[in-house]
Image: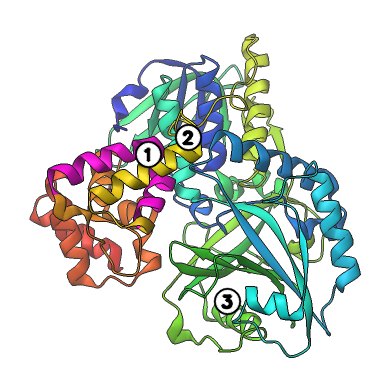
Amino acid sequence: MKRDFAGLRGEFDLLVCGGGIYGAWTAYDAALRGLKVALVEQGDWAGATSSSSSKLIHGGLRYLETYDFKLVRKALKERRLLLRIAPHRVWPLRFGVPVYADSRNGTLLLKAGLTLYDTLAGFPGEPMRHHHFWKREFAVHFPFLNEGGLHGGFTYGDAQTDDARLVLELVAGALAHGAVCVNYARLLAWNEQDGKVCGAAVQDKVSGETLQVRAGQCVSTAGQWTTATAQGRAWCRLSKGIHLVLPALPTGEAILLTSKKDGRVFFIIPWYGRTLLGTTDTDYRGDIDNVTVEEADIEYLLDAANGYLKQAWTKADVIGSYAGVRVMKQSDAAHPSAASRDWELKTAGNGLHHAIGGKLTSAREDAAVIVDTVCAQLGVDVACASKKQRLPWAPQQQFAAWTTDTISKAQRLGIDADSAMWLMRRHGMRVERVFDIVAEAPQLAVRIVAGLPFIYADLLLCAREEMVVHLSDLLRRRLPLLILARPDAVELRHFAELLAPALGWDERRVAQEVEGCIS
């Protein structure tokens, strides 16, 4: 993946502005259909909401309470598809749902809901089907939960991903099919001819150069920045969600819980050897360029979780945190948790298409609708291929055999099994490039942080090949060390100096990048 701002010169069939999950899927889908595509992002790929999710590919069990069966069915269909076309990128994750004496939903209601969930999923096989457990069995699954008042519980299947790397892989796929994709390329203005949008003025935030990008069709997948205009504010409702990173719990399964304070759903999720706790769901009217985690957010989530845990978490246990803003369709719902998560495509009077709302899980199908619309406007009759095509980094051979062979090779190179598993999930078949680095420099097989499954060779590959502009790109989205660990200034300088030759940084740039990660 090479950054080429000059490649934006010329005429394109489609210009996509916004490099989150919707922009990435749209560019990838359009490139697969043979369109000439440009994708620009003002910051880093997945630099906002698309790297601030709960990292789940799921149907949304809680949406059954609002009778949003259509959305749940759609998301479950996409979950099944993604597990098939991207087994390295999307993997099964079971969830537990405890039933207490004071639970809002009792055993019978949960049984009915989970049976419906399985039905909407097309009667899935054993890894996804729900199961009921009585108190003693459930407590064995989740030994960290309070047992007072516990009647039992259920487990059911959903799936997990690394959201930032999913976006990155789609961008890589678009590039491989001829698209021009540039991060740190800021939209200055949409250009119009005869009242119709015909491209945009785009500025390179690295060099300062400005280009006029010409395109037959233009799509804005700008997420929260859609609300920068009065028209966008009329279309969108924003909701802030935060997550806390906490120490690992003794389970490989996740938990779905409801806050005893207000009944809102939140998750406790294993991720990269840590635990994600989230999310909040509150209306957001603040600065769209600076979304932060506030003390009240932290206190809310800790209080909600501690209502269920044998050993309470404190603020001192919080390793990291992150915040994101969801875009939803405008609604009259009293609380954002009751607003629809479904998606729609708006087309302005000047012909500019806007993606509004949506979910990480269903973004592929929604992007296909966007590209269908674009193709119709261009007079191109080419069907969507993204539902049949394996993701770009997916191994071509049978996945179980590939997994066994790859872990065996990793261990022969001195890479521990847990790090090897996460390397496969992070890089897919590109993991061989990590192995090549370790073969040349065996000392790079060691972990960067003892408790996290990241090795130095992974860090180096990302720096060399994944369009990194800033140290924060590398340590927040390529490898999420900034939220999973607490690197200090000395450690950050160590990383920057190690990677400086690959990134062409001098001493002054190293100091700037370290400061950028601290501030």
How packed is label 1: few (under 14 Cα within 10 Å), some, or many (20 or more)? many
Three-letter residue code for mark 2: Leu
Residue found at x 62% / y 35%: 364
Q: Is residue 494 magenta?
A: no
Which residue is disc 2 drawn over? 170
CB within 8 Å, label 1 to label 3: no
Residue type at mark 1? Asn
How far apart are the two marked residues, 1 and 2, measured between alpha carbons?
14 Å
| Residue 168 seen in the current view | no
Numbered disc in front, either 1 or 2 = 2
**Which span of residues is magenta-colored?**
419-441
The residue at the point 31 percent across, 42 percent down is 205
Residue at 65% in and 16% down: 383
Whether residue 419 is visible: yes
Secondary structure mostly seen in the magenta stretch: helix
Secondary structure beneath disc 2?
A: helix
The alpha-carbon separation of the residues under discs 1 and 3 comes to: 31 Å
Marker disc for residue 117: none
First along the sequence among labels 1 and 2: 2
Q: Indicate the quadrant where residue 172 lies.
A: top left
From the viewer's perspective, is 371 left or right of 179?
right
C-alpha separation, residue under disc 3 versus residue under disc 2: 32 Å
| Front residue of this view, candidates 345 and 81 | 81
Pick whichever, 364 or 268, lies toward us.
268
Instruction: Identify residue for label 1.
Output: 183
Amino acid at dot 3 = Asp
Quadrant into which the C terminus falls: bottom left
* Residue linked to disc 3: 297
| Up/down of 415 relative to 193, above or below | below
